[in-house]
Image (spheres, rainbow, N blue to C red):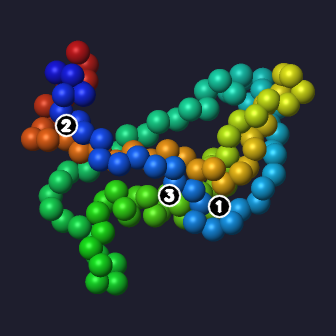
Amino acid sequence: MSTASWVMKVAEELVAPCEPTPCATLPLSSIDHALELVFMVMVEIISVYPNNNREHRLHGMSLSAAKVIREALAKALVLYYPVAGHLVSSDGDHVEVACNDEGVWFVEAMAADYNLGDMNIND
């Protein structure tokens, strides 16, 4: 079964740090360059939560799991601000991180009438 046939994108946006962060260009470590990790910087994380019609409550407001995660990500990016930047090339061979509060992509999706057991990942 194709994933596209049962997963629907609800929203997508750049999530930026919720507070100002330092603007700088930071060099990658010599370990990053030696191991050629500059080509492996794209990290995708998929978190799956059951739709059990429970919502988190904060100060009397109802919050969806996606909203809670989005807000937590914005707070985490304040402390880990280089993650919200992008890679830039300097001096030809070297790659640096431009810390610019750009943010990271957050995509919210939902699956209709399926659970994880219905998806055959090993096929």
Q: Is residue 46 left or right of residue 15?
A: left
In this rendering, the answer to whether 33 lies above or below 110 is above
Q: Amino acid at mark 2?
A: Leu
Disc 2 is placed on an element classified as helix
Where does residue 99 sit, x and y in percent of width and height? 73, 49
Q: Residue furthest bottom?
A: 59
Front in this rendered view, residue 37 or 22: 22
Mark 1 in CB contact with mark 3 (< 8 angstroms):
no
Image quarter for residue 88?
top right
Where does residue 73 sit, x and y in percent of width and height? 50, 57
Q: Amino acid at mark 3?
A: Leu
Quadrant for the N terminus in the image: top left
Q: Is residue 34 left or right of residue 79?
A: right
Q: Is residue 77 left or right of residue 54?
A: right
Q: Which mark is residue 79?
A: 1
In this rendering, the answer to whether 123 lies above or below 106 is above
Q: Is residue 29 left or right of residue 122?
A: right
Report the residue marked by disc 2. Answer: 116
Mark 2 or 3, which is nearer the eye?
3
In this rendering, the answer to whether 18 lies above or below 91 is below
Disc 3 is placed on an element classified as helix
In this rendering, the answer to whether 42 lies above or below 99 is above
Q: Which mark is residue 73?
A: 3
Find the distance from the CA under tag 2 to the CA under tag 3. 24 Å
